[in-house]
Structures are given as C-alpha cells and as structure tokens.
Image (cartoon, coloured by chain):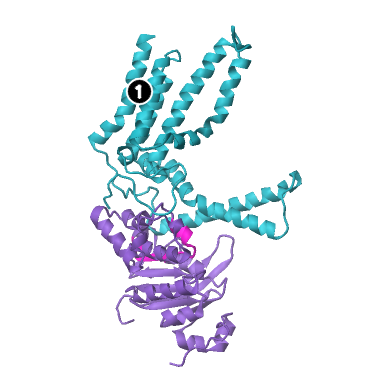
Chain colours: A cyan, B purple
C-alpha cells in the first residue's frame, strides 16, 4: 500500500514523547529527520567550547525547528528532566576539578572544571533538545521504519519494534502478577520481600520468553524469513532531503566558522 | 462436498514423539474436503496442538504424511504450505505483532512478494470480511479481545489460504463476541478446521467433527450424531455444558 510518508492518523492514545501534528517537520520522512538530528549532534560536538556565539546559533536553529513543528517550549522543557543526572555531574566538575582556581560568588572553583562543565552542559542540552524535537514530531514506529530505511541492522530494528508492540502486553502481565501476589496477602515492606519479587521477575521473563517463541511461530506461519517486509513506501524526495538537510547543514557551517574564527 | 477430487487436507499415518520421548500422536488419519467445516474435538493433552503444528510444517512428521491440496508438507514446499494453511493462534497477542492492524494484515502477503495497490486491496478485503476495516490504522493493543481475534483471522485470510485452522476460536470471548465470530466464520467461503473444547460452538459451525483422543482419531462423523452419543463423549473426557442438549435434527 502506498502511504504518503506523513504522520499516520491513529486513534487512541499516543506515545508520551510524540505530539501529533501536521506541520512541515511532522510530514518529513523519518529517515531524513533521523539523519538530520544525528548530523546536527555531530556538528555541535565538533564545535570548540570557547565559541559561545556558535552555541547561540545552534539554540536558534532548534528554536526555529520547534516553531516550524509547533512544539511549545513547555513541552520541551518538561521532557528535558531526563538530562538532570548529567547536569548534576556537570555541576560537580568545577568543585572537584583540578588546576587553577577562580573565585565565583565566594567559592573556589577549578577553571578547567568550569570549562568542562560548560562544554558538557551546552552540548548535552542541545543534543537532548534535538532528540526531543525529533521524538515530538515522529511517531515511534515511524522512527523505526526510518531506521530500517537507513539500513540499520535488521535485528536491532526488529527487537525495537517488538519492544514497542509488546511493552503494554508485558506491563499488563506484570500488573496481573502483582494483583495475584497482593490478593494473597503479599506486601513488599522491606528487603526481606526481595526474593519474592525476584522470583516474580524471573517468572515474567520466562513468560515473555515463551510468548516470544509463540510470536515467532506465528511469524513463521505467515512466511517470515528473517526480514521484515517493507510495507510502507517511505521514499523521500530530493526536496524533503533538502528541507531536512537545512538543520545539519547550517549547523555544519557554524561549526566550520567557529573553528576558523577561534 | 467431499466429492472434490483433491481434499484440502489429507493426513495419513501421522505419528510424532517430542524430543524428550513423549509420544503425542500415534498414527492420525483424516481427510477434509474442500469447503468443509470440521471441528477437531478432544480433551487437553490429546495431541490437538501437536497435530495443528504439523499442518503447516512447524513440526515435521516423525512418521506418516500431511498433504495440503495435494502438496506434501516437507522442507522444499514450506513456503507454499504456509500460504495454503492459515493458522489462527489462540492468543491474538501472539498473532498480532506489528504496530498497526494494516501492517499486521499486510505482513503475510508482503512476505509472498505482494506490494503496492494490490497489497492494499488484499488487506482491505481481508479486514472487510471480518468486519474490521474501520480499525485499519489502529494499533492492535487498543482493540478489544474479540476485535483482536477477528483481526487475527484477517491476517490469515489475507494469504488466501486453502484451509483455515483455528485454535480454540471461542476462548475468552464474551457471548456477543463469540456469536459475532461465529457469524463471520459461517460466511467465509473457505475450508475450516476448528480445534475446540466448545462443543456447542462445534455444533453450530461444523457439520462434521473428529475426536482426537490418545493420539489417534477416535471418532469421525456428523457433529450432531457425535455429540448425542453420551458414552462416546464420556469415554474421551468430553462433556456438553450443563443444560445443553443437541437439538433433534
């Protein structure tokens, strides 16, 4: 079936990271967006940390993508919580860093550490925002179809596909096991209950494994030979590649300029 | 209906022992003519699932043979056999593994090399036959259990099988979903082998029944006759539900 490479309308709830829409960014084929995001990340990482202006340009580029995809800032900010562990790590570096110290607000901080922290923080933040924008405008399964299209290893793509499909089924099974435990008076109060939970986890693993075997049989019964047939026509036009190329293209120019100016 | 020269399914002398030595089938003989709807009845552990696994070559016969529309099940014919035998598994979550109904129904025919508008037509047609065309772009896990089972039937119908093999089609369905599925199955123009414990369902849908017990076909005849024979049923751990009587023909 020839389906335009746009966001497929599916009823029901959506993945938390995805924000349904029908913008230029949403309509781009997933493989273009995946490559664009990866290219952008490479350009950001390749930029010298002293080029503050370049990071400003990157932020503006992402803001432009967000505006084009109608992704509100609040949506992005809430999902940036995932970065918190890195932020904590970055904050710690100037305090525990070695080398020359500088006084900031009465604290003695390592100058090298400050630079390293800034470097990690700026680059990680740009990368995280780019990923959030990618996820917000691309349905998870489209992302996988894009990955398949980009010839990422079949096996990995298929594993991710099944994870996506069976996550709910397994969570449901887990919930049923919990209900069954609690119906018989089990309460996880402290460490002594760990063996019971561990056994439940083991049972869940075996159940999932057996389901995997049954699914494999069902696939074989319908002619599976190791490769997922490509059912959707996801080919991208040159124009779509051009549009998607704007982000990594401009980022690459910025990165080159930052080196030649520094 | 059995007058068709080549039966849809022909099993002769089929015996099978699992690798651990447990013998599950001791020489099964059966023949199903084109267009017939046949129920395969039997208690748990009778070898029903083992037999079903032989029909499309997931298990290969230790002894004896299986022919589907004249074609023997063996390694060389596997691809064609799997197209001809449509297996509908008991748990639709095992059968529906793709992200959307459309992709799932397309999986089989796409593996047969079908693409484009032809594939699209095949998918829509199969979903239409089970009354699930409206759900074409929905993820399977957002459908009700009964709807998922109907889509599971569609995934197999899309391969235009010679014979549809259903494993416990009525299990876990509420009464309305059970009746809806029966209506769909009655209207399909395809040979059906239905593996079930649900004797009233067999009576409703299948003119003929086989009883598999102890790894052999213990009885083969018109469903009303078999189900009226209390002694026969009792001998094979089969029972009609409380209050149910086979209507007089």
Q: Quadrant of residue A222?
A: bottom left
Q: Residue at x 41, y 75 (%)?
A: B182
| Quadrant of the snapshot with the N terminus of chain B | bottom left
Please state the horizontal and vertical placement of residue A30, each as a whole percent of the image.
Answer: 34, 39
* Residue at the top extreme of this rendering: A100
Q: How far from the left and from the top, in percent, is residue B169?
A: 46, 70
- Residue B244: x percent and y percent? 53, 86
Q: Which residues are magenta?
A: B80-96
* Location of residue A118 in the rendering, given as x and y in whole percent from the top left corner: 51, 18
Residue for point 57% across, 82% down: B239
Quadrant for residue B77, please give it. bottom left
Left or right position of A209 against A237: right
Q: What residue sits 50% from the left and 33% below the top?
A: A80
Q: How many marks?
A: 1
Residue extending farthest to the bottom is B248
Chain ID of residue with mark 1? A
- Please state, as top left, top right, bottom left or bottom right, where the C terminus of chain B lies in the image: bottom left
Vertical comparison of B174 with A143: above or below:
below
- The verdict on residue B86 being magenta is yes
Q: Nearer the viewer, residue A177 or B31?
A: A177
Q: Which residue is mark 1?
A: A251
Q: Residue at x 40, y 63 (%)?
A: B151
The reply to whether the magenta stretch includes residue A173 is no
């Amino acid at each position: 079936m020839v389906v335009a490479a746009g966001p497929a309308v599916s009823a029901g709830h959506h993945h938390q990271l995805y924000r349904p829409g029908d913008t230029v960014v949403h309509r781009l084929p997933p493989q273009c967006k995946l490559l664009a995001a990866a290219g952008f990340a490479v350009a950001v990482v390749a930029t010298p940390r002293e080029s503050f202006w370049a990071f400003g340009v990157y932020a503006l580029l992402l803001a432009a993508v967000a505006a084009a995809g109608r992704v509100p800032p609040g949506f992005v900010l809430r999902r940036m919580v995932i970065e918190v562990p890195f932020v904590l790590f970055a904050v710690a570096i100037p305090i525990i860093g070695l080398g020359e110290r500088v006084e900031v607000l009465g604290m003695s901080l390592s100058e090298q550490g400050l630079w390293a922290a800034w470097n990690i923080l700026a680059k990680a933040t740009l990368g995280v925002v780019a990923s959030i924008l990618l996820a917000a405008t691309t349905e998870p399964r489209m992302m996988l179809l894009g990955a398949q299209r980009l010839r990422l290893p079949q096996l990995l793509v298929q594993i991710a596909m099944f994870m996506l499909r069976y996550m709910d089924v397994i969570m449901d099974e887990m919930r049923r096991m919990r209900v069954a435990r609690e119906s018989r008076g089990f309460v996880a109060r402290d460490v002594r209950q760990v063996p019971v939970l561990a056994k439940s986890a083991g049972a869940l693993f075996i159940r999932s494994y057996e389901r995997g075997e049954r699914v494999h049989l069902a696939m074989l019964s319908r002619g599976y030979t190791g490769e997922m047939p490509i059912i959707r026509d996801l080919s991208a036009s040159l124009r779509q590649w051009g549009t998607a190329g704007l982000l990594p293209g401009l980022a690459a120019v910025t990165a080159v300029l930052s080196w030649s100016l520094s | 209906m059995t007058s068709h020269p080549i039966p849809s399914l022909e099993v002769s002398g089929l015996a099978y022992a699992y690798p651990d030595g447990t013998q599950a089938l001791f020489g099964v003989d059966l023949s199903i003519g084109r267009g017939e709807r046949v129920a395969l009845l039997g208690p748990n552990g009778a070898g029903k699932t083992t037999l079903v696994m032989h029909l499309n070559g997931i298990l290969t016969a230790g002894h004896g043979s299986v022919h589907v529309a004249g074609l023997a099940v063996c390694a060389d014919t596997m691809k064609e056999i799997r197209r001809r035998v449509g297996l509908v598994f008991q748990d639709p979550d095992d059968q529906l593994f793709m992200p959307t109904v459309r992709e799932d129904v397309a999986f089989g025919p796409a593996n047969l090399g079908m693409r484009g508008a032809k594939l699209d037509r095949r998918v829509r047609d199969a979903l239409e036959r089970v009354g699930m065309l409206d759900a074409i772009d929905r993820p399977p896990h957002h459908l009700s259990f009964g709807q998922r089972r109907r889509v599971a039937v569609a995934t197999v119908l899309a391969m235009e099988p010679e014979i549809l093999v259903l494993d416990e089609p009525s299990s876990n369905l509420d009464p309305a979903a059970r009746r809806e599925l029966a209506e769909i199955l009655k209207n399909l123009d395809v040979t059906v082998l239905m593996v079930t414990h649900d004797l009233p369902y067999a009576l409703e849908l299948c003119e003929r029944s086989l009883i598999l017990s102890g790894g052999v076909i213990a009885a083969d005849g018109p469903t009303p006759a078999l189900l009226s024979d209390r002694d026969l049923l009792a001998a094979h751990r089969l029972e009609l539900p409380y209050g149910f009587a086979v209507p007089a023909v």
